[in-house]
Each structure stands twice: as C-alpha cells, then as structure tokens.
Amino acid sequence: MPAEGGLKFALRALSHPNYRLFFAGQSVSLIGTWLTRIATSWLVYRLTGSGAILGLIGFCGLVPTFVLAPLAGVYVDRHSRHRVIVVTQVLSMIQSFALATLALLHVITVAEVAALQLFQGVINAFDTPARQAFVVEMIEDRRDLPNAIALNSSMFNGARLIGPSIGGVLIALVGEGGCFLIDGISYIAVIASLLAMKLRPAAPRSAPKHVVQELREGFRYAASSQPIRVMLGLLGVVSLVGMPFSVLMPLIASERLHGGANTLGFLMAAVGLGALGGAVSLALRRSVIGLGTTIVRSAFSFGITLVAFAASQKIWLSLPLLILVGFSMMLQTASTNTVLQTILEERMRGRVMAFYTMAVMGTAPFGALIAGVLADRIGAPWTIAGGGVVCAGAAGYCAAQLPRLREQVRPIYQKLGILPEVAEGLRAAQDVSTPAA
C-alpha cells in the first residue's frame, strides 16, 4: 500500500465532519487532562510522601464510576449523548479551575484534592459511556467505526505522551496550579467543537421503563453473551491488579530510580508512546477479525512486561519496558472496545459501554487502594510484579475459551457482512438447494 494511501486509510474516520470536530477538540483538551493527572500525583506525593495516600486519591477519582456507571448507562440510553457530553465537559472545566485556584493560592490540602477527585469521578461516570456510545452517531459509515475507535485511542495516548512529557517541566516552571489552570483553559476547545457539530435528529427511543428494569435488562444482556462476559471479565481483572502500576509511578520514579518530577514525566510518556503505537497498529487494521486473539495475547504481554518493569532498577531499561507495557495495555482495551461496539445491539449500547467503563475505570479504584497499601508494606516493585503475574494468568485462562467464543461471534459477523466470503457462500448454497421456479 503506498504511503499516502496507507495514511489516508489509517485516518479514514476523519472524513466524517462531526468526528473531525470531536477529534480536534479532544486532542487539545486531553493534553490538559494529562497535565492535571501528573500534577495531581506529584502534588499529593510532595505533600504526603505516602504510597497509601496516592492509592487513596486514585480511589477517590475512580470509585464513583464503579458505583454510578450502570445508572449512567441507563441515562445515556435515554437521553441525547451529545448533550450529556457538553454538560460533563463544562463541569470538568469547573473542576480544573477549582483545583487551580486552590493550588495557586497555596491553600490546597489533600482532603480538598480528594473531594475534587470524587467530583471528577462522578462526572466521568456519565461522560465516559456517553462518549463511547456517541462515536457511533458521529460516524455515518459503520465500516469506519473500528478506525474511529482506534483514532480515539491514538488521540488519548498521543496526549498521554505529550502531557506527561511537558508536565514534569511545567511543574518545575509554573507549579501544579499552573498545570491545573492550563487544563481548565483546554476544555474550551472540546466544548467549542461539540457545539459546532451538525447532528441528524436522533432516532425515536422506546418509552423508558423503570430504571431498575432497564438495569436488569442490561445486566441480563451482557451476562447472557459469553463473548461480552469474557472480554469484560478479563478487562476487569487487568484493570484491578495491573493498571494501578501508574498510581505507584511516583514511588518508582523517586525511590527505585532516584529521580524527580522529570523522571516521572519520562516514565508516563514512555507508557503513552507505547500506547500510541498500539492504537496506530489498530488504526491500520482492515477488519475486526482476529481481535479476540489480539485481546488475549496483549493481556498476557501486559502482565509479563509489568513483571520485568518491576525488576528494573535503571531508567534506560525501565523506559523501553514501559513502552511495551503501554503498547500491550492499549491493544487490549481498544480491541475490546472495538469488538464490543461491533457485536452489541444499538438499544443496549449505552448500558454495555457503561459496563466497559466499569471494567476499565470502575475496578481501578479498588486496585489503586490495594496497591497503595501493599506498596507501603512490601514495596511498589513487588506490588507491580504481583499484579503482572495475575494478569498473565487470567489471559492464559481466557485463551482456552477462544475457540468457543469464535463460534458464538461468527454468526454476528456474518449477519453484519464482516465475513462476506462466508455470507456469499451460504447464499450460494441456498441458491443451489432452492428449486428453480
């Protein structure tokens, strides 16, 4: 494939005007978000020097997603996803400005950081499933949906690469408060892009039922599908025991590698670089076929490279290992997102993506809390290594389920035309077996 044609193919979702606006606005805003993440971690570590407190702050920021995501999924299925996202982005901007004000006035405390993290967690519980489900509304041609999901991941991890890279420098230059202020200003870009969209009228939705009944329907739908159940289960395990490595990164940077804020920025940027590479590799894929194997292999690779990273005591070795960690992490999460968005029914999209949000973000606060406590008792390296072993073991278990999962997904792919050669073969067989009129 020529280079120009390959680039055009990898960016094909940007041919949709609404998605192009969304991509541009989010690309700016997410850099600010990562500035806030690294500045928050460094601020809390500077104030307390405690791994347990870092874990507690991570818990506060993510636990609302675990509690509220199912209800948020019902809400997203009932209301305009576009309107929900506009509101959540405005509230997120207010939260960042509140952090900036307290930090710039030098009156901020850990309790205030925890409270504002809780507030942001409530916002994210609604924002994330709404944003995931809204992608379908921005993409007119469903064949471009996997590419849009991959570009979303590229955008997120490009920001993960750029944000921490400059975050360590900005913390030294303007302090944590300056980073929070930049983040607040960056939300203007995404809000403007959302308001500039021209959306078609939404299809009429069925009359809402009682919220408990709709929740029950969503859980029953996800639980009755083995592919959905296994993918979300593996993602939940990896998020619970593997993802908290990022919460412990300030400890690794300071105590293991004997560095400062710049070292933390480099470590986080390495994860972002790897994740960006994983997202780009998905954007270049022509089909969702084979992503089940990719999900399992990447989860196993994630676990093994976490163990290797935990054993490293040199920055020159830790950075390439984190690139592999980020690459594997992104392959699993984005591939899971792509397969789910492909096989689920539209009426259940908000609720299932809320369960996806729970698996990615809802289990993470408990993992962060546990990891923080363990880090204070047995050390951050052993905590990270233990999580990696569990991730690899869970991936091995899911690998044994792949043949059965393929059998269940295959008819869905045939119905959607993703396996055209199979569908054409079936039609030909039917034509042969049908007597001529």
Image (tube, grey):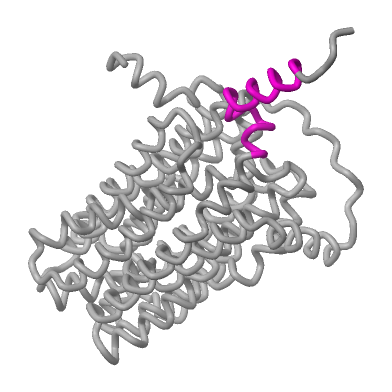
- Residue in front for this viewpoint, 352 or 63: 352
Magenta extent: 411-432
Residue at position x 74%, y 49% in the image: 348
- Residue in front for this viewpoint, 382 or 304: 304
Residue at position x 85%, y 41% in the image: 205
The answer to whether 292 is drawn above or below residue 312 in the figure is above
Dominant secondary-structure state across the stretch colored magenta = helix
Q: Quadrant of residue 140?
A: top right
Count of labels in the image: 0
The answer to whether 353 is drawn above or below residue 40 in the figure is above
In screen coordinates, is 142 left or right of 23? right
Q: Position of residue 9 (x, y in %)?
A: 41, 21
The quadrant of the rendering that contains the C terminus is top right
The quadrant of the rendering that contains the N terminus is top left
The answer to whether 346 is drawn above or below residue 248 in the figure is above
Residue at position x 70%, y 55% in the image: 351
Q: Position of residue 179 (x, y in %)?
A: 33, 56
Residue at position x 90%, y 57% in the image: 209
In screen coordinates, is 184 left or right of 406? left
Q: Residue furthest top?
A: 437
Visible residue check, residue 310: yes
Q: Position of residue 67 (x, y in %)?
A: 64, 72
- Residue in front for this viewpoint, 57 or 425: 425
Residue 38 painted magenta: no
- Residue in front for this viewpoint, 225 or 77: 225
